[in-house]
Structure formats: C-alpha cells, structure tokens
Image (tube, rainbow, N blue to C red):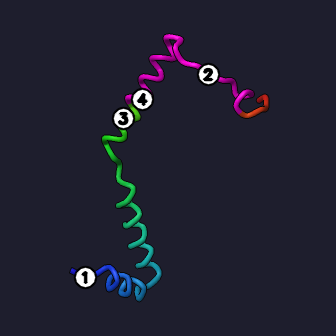
C-alpha cells in the first residue's frame, strides 16, 4: 500500500480535472450520513414537538431573539 506522502505527490502531478475528481470523492467520503446521529436528532425533534403540543415548551418571539419586527 502506498503511503500518504507518496499518494499526495502523485496526486499533485495530475491534471486539474483529475485532481477535482479526487477532491470531490474524498469530501463525499467524509460526509456520509450517520444513521445513529440521524436517529438521535429525529427522536429529539419528535420529543420537542410533543412537548410543544402539550404546552410544555418555552418559546420566544422573533422580535425577542433578533430584536426586530418582521
């Protein structure tokens, strides 16, 4: 297996369009969905909605948060 340093040296010799393909794929590989995190956020959102509907959530108006009226 090639070392990171060797891969980088070879990648820097590529044409710009080939570099772009590599960069895009590397970024895409780092941004893969995490099902565990998605489930945690879904559970949180559902609980917040339940609390809101039961009148158990606090809220602030847009004006209170941003200091301006729409």
Q: CA distance from mark 2 to mark 4?
A: 16 Å
Q: Residue at x 31, y 41 (%)?
A: 36
Q: Tell me which label, 1 or 3, sits earlier in the chain.
A: 1
Q: Tell me which label, 1 or 4, sits earlier in the chain.
A: 1
Q: Tell me which label, 3 or 2, sits earlier in the chain.
A: 3
Which label number is shown at residue 16?
none
> Is 30 located above or below residue 49 in the figure?
below
Q: CA distance from mark 1 to mark 3?
A: 38 Å
User: In this figure, which residue is indicated by the disc labeled 1?
Assistant: 2
Magenta part of the protein: which range? 43-65
Q: Is residue 26 magenta?
A: no
Residue 62 x, y percent position in the rendering: 70, 28
User: In this figure, which residue is indicated by the disc labeled 2?
Assistant: 59
Residue 44 x, y percent position in the rendering: 42, 29
Q: Residues within 10 Å of mark 1 (few under 14, many from 20)?
A: few
Q: Disc 3, disc 4: CB below 8 Å? A: yes
User: In this figure, which residue is indicated by the disc labeled 3?
Assistant: 40
Q: Residue at x 37, y 39 (%)?
A: 38
Q: Tell me which label, 2 or 1, sits earlier in the chain.
A: 1
Q: Residue at x 58, y 19 (%)?
A: 58
User: In this figure, which residue is indicated by the disc labeled 4?
Assistant: 44
């Amino acid at each position: 297996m090639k070392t990171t340093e060797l891969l980088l040296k070879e990648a820097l010799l590529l044409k710009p369009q080939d570099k772009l393909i590599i960069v895009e794929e590397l970024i895409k590989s780092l941004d893969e969905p995490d099902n565990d995190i998605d489930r945690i956020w879904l559970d949180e959102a559902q609980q917040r909605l339940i609390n809101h509907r039961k009148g158990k959530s606090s809220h602030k108006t847009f004006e209170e948060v941003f200091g301006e009226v729409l």
